[in-house]
Amino acid sequence: MVIDGKKVVSVSYTLSTPGKLTDAETVVEKTDPGVPLVWLYGVGSMIPDFEKNLEGKKAGDFFDFRISAANGYGLYDESHVAQIPLDAFRGKDGTIDTTMVKLENILPMMDNEGNHLQGVVKEISLTEVKMDFNHPMAGKDLHFIGKVEEVRVPSSEELEHGHVHGEGGHHH
């Protein structure tokens, strides 16, 4: 069975990103042996170019492809870096939780329109916190090497819910 339409796909893979100054790659993520990535192909839950590169493959096929930053998690955008008043981080008692507001910590935030965001603390001054709201992989080219482990027809419930159930998937 080949990957197309809406299928449940399982892959094991290693994701690397090339270095800025050399061709040496850094491993960013790797599936554990026997614990592949499992998802419902064709419903928009993955990077479009990731799925395009797997289309037509079947269980047992190997893959090795690259996705440019622009087609992956997007280019790094300086306009997604913001200076937020330190007072915005004060609790009801007037103090700042320094276990949360610390360099490189990821904080859940909400914008003025109620959208949930994740921001990385980049700098802390006496009056402001510089936060980066770019995706952590923004601006990075992606290199995937792996193997298609399984391709199967989804259950009607999986199609209805838009995700995989059971082992490797969602549990209700």
Image (spheres, rainbow, N blue to C red):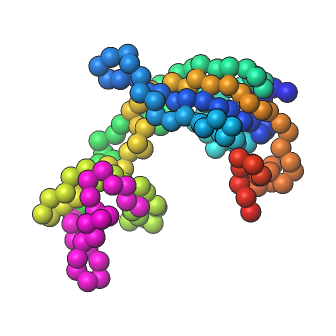
The residue positioned 41% from the left and 22% from the top of the image is 25
Q: Is residue 82 visible?
A: no
Instruction: Name the quadrant of the N terminus.
Output: top right
Residue 111 position in % (x across, y down): 39, 62
The residue positioned 29% from the left and 82% from the top of the image is 92
Most prominent secondary structure in the magenta stretch?
loop
Residue 69 position in % (x across, y down): 44, 29
| Vertical comparison of 135 with 5: above or below | below
Residue 37 sits in which quadrant? Answer: top right
Residue 148 sits in which quadrant? Answer: top right
On the rendered structure, is 79 left or right of 57?
Answer: left
Residue 44 position in % (x across, y down): 65, 42
Residue 66 position in % (x across, y down): 53, 21
Q: Nearer the viewer, residue 88 or 169?
A: 169
| Vertical comparison of 24 with 151: above or below | above
Residue 33 sits in which quadrant? Answer: top right
- Residue 104 painted magenta: yes
**How many numbered callouts?**
0
Instruction: Name the quadrant of the C terminus.
Output: bottom right
The residue positioned 83% from the left and 44% from the top of the image is 154
Q: Nearer the viewer, residue 133 or 120?
A: 120
On the rendered structure, is 166 left or right of 32?
Answer: right
Part of the protein shown in magenta: 85-108
Q: Is residue 35 visible?
A: yes
| Vertical comparison of 162 with 77: above or below | below
The residue positioned 64% from the left and 20% from the top of the image is 63
Q: Residue furthest front?
A: 33
On the rendered structure, is 37 left or right of 161?
Answer: left
On the rendered structure, is 3 left or right of 49?
Answer: right
Q: Nearer the viewer, residue 28 or 74?
A: 28
